Amino acid sequence: MNKEVRLRMLNKKSILLTLLLIIGLTVPYSLKLLSPQLEPYPAIIFPAGPGKVKGSQDTFDFIASNIYCFDLLTKEWERQDTLSFLSPIPRQYFQAIVKNEFGLNPKLEHTVKFRKGIFPSFTYKNSSALDLANIDHAKAWLRDRLQQHGCMDSSLIVRHTRMSVDLATRVVSEMNVIDEKIFKL
């Protein structure tokens, strides 16, 4: 085989592999564009960020979500450090865990909507993954976490708060509670 024939064969293989790679990366990305709620797997799609920030010239607003538990020493609801409370679960999964209500609600439904109505939306339930044994395991894990943090182990609160920060002083200038959900264990 001469050199020219080898180069043509190598060139054809390179083109084929490049096309396969393009298809393999474009399909998951297209699905992500069609529906922001879907997360195609496996895919090489990096998140745009942990959340949206609205801003003006001198302030920016964002929503913070935190876990609160009833502290046995202070007898008050105290905010917990998410990283410490969820350990060994990484902090970036906190929003998904809250959205799934810590795996405690088998009747929870999720609706997937597509942008611009390209495809019809659909709803699915957690009930297939959340049998009584899994719910009891999740409750036991949460009770253990609450006890480790010196809290009453019968309930916790997830609170979503809007915060406004002054860019000049870097001081939180406004805080108000948007939503709050109590989880009974």
Image: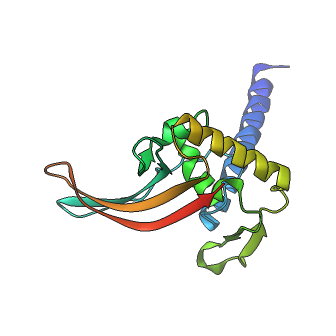
Residue 26 visible in the current orientation: yes
The residue at the far left in this view is: 168
Q: As displayed, is residue 26 above or below residue 111?
A: above
Asked which colour scheme the image uses, the reply is rainbow
Image side of residue 13 versus residue 70, left or right: right
In the rendered image, residue 161, in percent from the top left (x then y), is placed at: 39, 61
Looking at the image, which is closer to me, 34 or 106? 106
Image side of residue 116 versus residue 76, left or right: right
In the rendered image, residue 168, in percent from the top left (x then y), is placed at: 13, 51
Residue at 71% across, 76% down: 121
Residue at 44% across, 61% down: 160
Image side of residue 108 versus residue 152, left or right: right
Image quadrant occupied by the C terminus = bottom right
Q: As displayed, is residue 101 above or below residue 83?
A: below
Q: Which image quarter: residue 145?
A: top right
Image side of residue 105 versus residue 68, left or right: right
Q: As displayed, is residue 9 above or below residue 74?
A: above
Q: Which image quarter: residue 81?
A: top left
Image quadrant occupied by the N terminus = top right
Looking at the image, which is closer to me, 40 or 66? 66
In the rendered image, residue 162, in percent from the top left (x then y), is placed at: 36, 63
Residue at 82% across, 63% down: 127
